[in-house]
Image (spheres, helix red, strand yellow):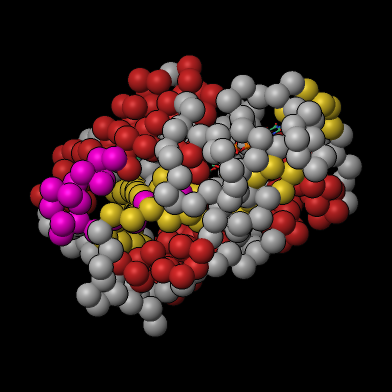
Amino acid sequence: MSASSTKSILVTGGAGYIGSHTVLQLLLSGCHVAAVDNLDNSSHLAISRVSHLAADSANRLSFHKLDLRDRPALERVFSSNKFDAVIHFAGLKAVGESVAKPLFYYNNNVIGTIVLLEVMAAYGCKKLVFSSSASVYGSPERVPCTEDFPLAPMNPYGKTKLVVEDICRDLHRADPEWQIMLLRYFNPVGAHPSGLLGEDPRGIPNNLMPYVQQVAVGRRPALTVFGNDYSTKDGTGIRDYIHVVDLADGHNAALTKLFEKDSKIGCEAYNLGTGKGTSVLEIVSAFEKASGKKIPVVFGERRPGDCEILYAATTKAETQLNWKAKYGIEEMCRDQWNWACNNPYGYGSSDSNPQDEIISTKTKGGGDSWFSDICITS
Ligand code: NAD
Ligand code: UFG
C-alpha cells in the first residue's frame, strides 16, 4: 500500500484523456476521488467507464460537472469534502487554437487555476500536482531536456503553463506550507488496455497519434507529415511519446512523494517522459505493424512553431519519484489501435461502444450496479 492510498484527492479535468486514466489508477490504489470537469472537451461516458473498470472501488468516486472558474460551485465541492491533495488537469491544450484565441486560453488556464488555488487555500488544502508540459522548454538547444533548462514557451498555450508554474513557485515562496509538483508531460499517447478509455479529440486532430488512428480506421485519407527535411535520422520530427497509463502511474508516484512522512518537497518540476526519441515515420511504421493497416503519408511543409527534436531527461523522476515508464512504442500503438477499433468515433454517439449499452443497462439496474454508487452533481 502506498503512502497516498486511502487519501482523498480532488481531480480537476477528471473526465479528460489523462484525467480519466489517472482517476482509475487512483481508485485502484485505494484513494477516494472527486472528479470535476466542465465536459467542454470530454464526455460523461469516460467517467461511467472509469467506474465500470474500477468495479468495487467505484464507490470511492464522485463526479461534479462544473467549471473551475465557477467559484461557488467549486466551494460547494470543498465544503462537503476534506481533500488531502488536488491533481489539476483541467485546461485547454490545443496549441494552434491558443495562437488564434490567446485570451480564451489565458482566461481558462490561468484564471481557472487561480480560482482553484484560492479555494484550496481557503479550505486548508495545500498539496497540488499540476499538469505542466514539455512545451515550457520551447525549442531547446540540446536534448535530453533536464528540468533546469531555460523556460521559453513558443505559443500562448505553453505560456499559460509557464505562468501557472511561476504562480506556484511564488505561492510556495510566500507560504512554504504549499507543496507543489509541476509535472512536465512529454507526448502522451495510447489508451487503456481494456479499450474503454482513450483520447477523443473534437474535430480534426492536432496531434500525431490521433491523426494516424483516424487514417487507419478510414476517417481520413492520409497523414500529412509536417516536414521531412529536419536533421534527424529520417528527416522527420522527433518526440518522446509516453503511454498514458505510465503517465497516470506517474501521478500516483508524485502523490506518494507528497504524502511521504517529512516530505521535503517545496515546489518542484519533474519531466514525465521515457527519455527515448521517436520520429514521425517510426510512429507510422509502428502503427502499421500494430494495426495491419497501411497508413498513406503525404510530405508537407514544416508546421510553424514545431521544434526538431524533443525528449526528456528522466533521471530526476526516476531517482526522486521512484517512477519510470514501462511501456514502449509497440504497446502504445497496440493500445491506441485497440481503442480505435472499439471506438472508431471516440465516445461519440454515431458509433458508440457496445459496452456502453451493457454499462447503461447496469446503471438502470441499480442494486449492485457500480453506477448507483457514484454521485453526479451539476
Ligand atoms: P483533455 O482536454 O482530454 O482534458 C482536460 C479536461 O479539462 C477536459 O475534460 C476539459 O473538459 C476539462 N476542462 C478544461 N477547462 C476546464 C475548466 N475551466 N473547468 C473544468 N474543466 C475544464 O486533455 P488531456 O490531454 O487529458 O490533458 C490534461 C492536462 O495535461 C491539460 O492541462 C494539458 O494541458 C496537459 N498536457 C497535455 C498534453 C497532451 O498532449 N495531452 C501534454 C502536456 C500537458
Ligand atoms: N505531426 C505530423 N503530422 C500531424 C501531426 C503531427 O507530422 O498531422 C508531427 C509534428 O510535426 C511533430 C510530431 O508529429 O514532429 C508530434 O506532433 P504532436 O502535435 O503530436 O505533438 P507536439 O510535440 O507538437 O506537441 C504535443 C502537444 C503539446 C504538448 C507537447 C509536449 O500538442 O500540448 O506535446 O511535448 F505540450
Q: Quadrant of the N terminus?
A: bottom left
Q: Relative to residue 126, is residue 42 drawn left or right?
A: right
Q: Relative to residue 327, is residue 36 drawn left or right?
A: left
Q: Nearer the viewer, residue 344 or 92?
A: 92
Q: Which residues are magenta?
A: 166-184
Query: Farthest front residue?
Result: 141
Q: Quadrant of the C terminus?
A: top left
Query: Farthest bottom residue?
Result: 1
In magenta stretch: residue 168? yes
Residue 49 visible in the picture: no
Q: Residue 288's x, y, as percent?
A: 84, 48
The residue drawn where x is 54% and y is 56% is 313
Q: Residue 251's x, y, as percent?
A: 43, 61
Q: Relative to residue 307, is residue 318 drawn left or right?
A: left
Q: Nearer the viewer, residue 189 or 369?
A: 189
Q: Quadrant of ligand 2?
A: top right
In magenta stretch: residue 295? no
Residue 277 visible in the picture: yes
The residue drawn where x is 38% and y is 78% is 2
Q: Nearer the viewer, residue 191 or 304?
A: 304
Q: Residue 207's x, y, as percent?
A: 63, 36
The residue drawn where x is 79% and y is 47% is 282
Q: Residue 226's x, y, as percent?
A: 73, 28
Q: Quadrant of residue 149?
A: top left
Q: Relative to residue 337, is residue 313 drawn left or right?
A: left
The residue drawn where x is 82% and y is 40% is 234
